[in-house]
Amino acid sequence: MLGEYPTWESAADAVGGALRSYRIAAANPNKTAPPLLARTVFGLPLKGVPIQRLHGMPYIDRRASPLWLKLSKTRAGRYVAVATLFKSRFLPDGVQLNGSAPPRDYGLIEQWIQQWFPQRAEVRYA
């Protein structure tokens, strides 16, 4: 759980704004954006990052984000923002992004959660 908010609008603004700020921080002189190729872990396509494949491989033009964000209403009438990270293989072996290997882990997404949501709480199904 990333946080609790009084309205769904404030929850969407807080989480969406944090994600946007993190991904495009290069436009903000006070913050540093992760490198373009590293940001592909949030999903593809990403402007400026062509997906290259080895001969004989099927064409891949997108990769859905492994991060799912959901807003849920609590019994108390407030809203919680929940992030679910699906740690699956990012792209098939042999696929390259702009001549480089795709991300190998989801550390950048985990870093975003830790940096922007210090009051987060891990919730597990028991």
Image (tube, helix red, strand yellow):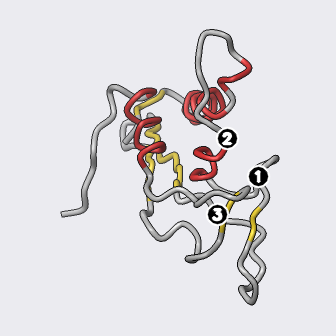
The residue at the point 75 percent across, 64 percent down is 51
Q: Position of residue 49 (x, y in %)?
A: 76, 52
Single out the mark in the foreground, 2 or 3.
Answer: 2
Q: Residue furthest bottom?
A: 56
Structural distance between the alpha carbons of marks 2 and 3: 17 Å
Q: In the visual, does 69 lie left or right of 47?
A: left
Residue 52 shows in this picture: yes
Please give the residue where the numbered disc 1 appears in the rendered image. 49
The residue at the point 78 percent across, 79 percent down is 59
Structural distance between the alpha carbons of marks 1 and 2: 8 Å
Q: Pointers 1 and 2 in contact (CB under 8 A)? A: yes
Mark 3 neighbour class, 10 Å CA radius: few under 14, some 14 to 19, many 20 or more: few
Please give the residue where the numbered disc 2 appears in the rendered image. 36
Give the amino acid at mark 2: Leu
Please give the residue where the numbered disc 3 appears in the rendered image. 64
Q: Between residues 69 and 71, which one lies in front from this camera angle?
A: 69
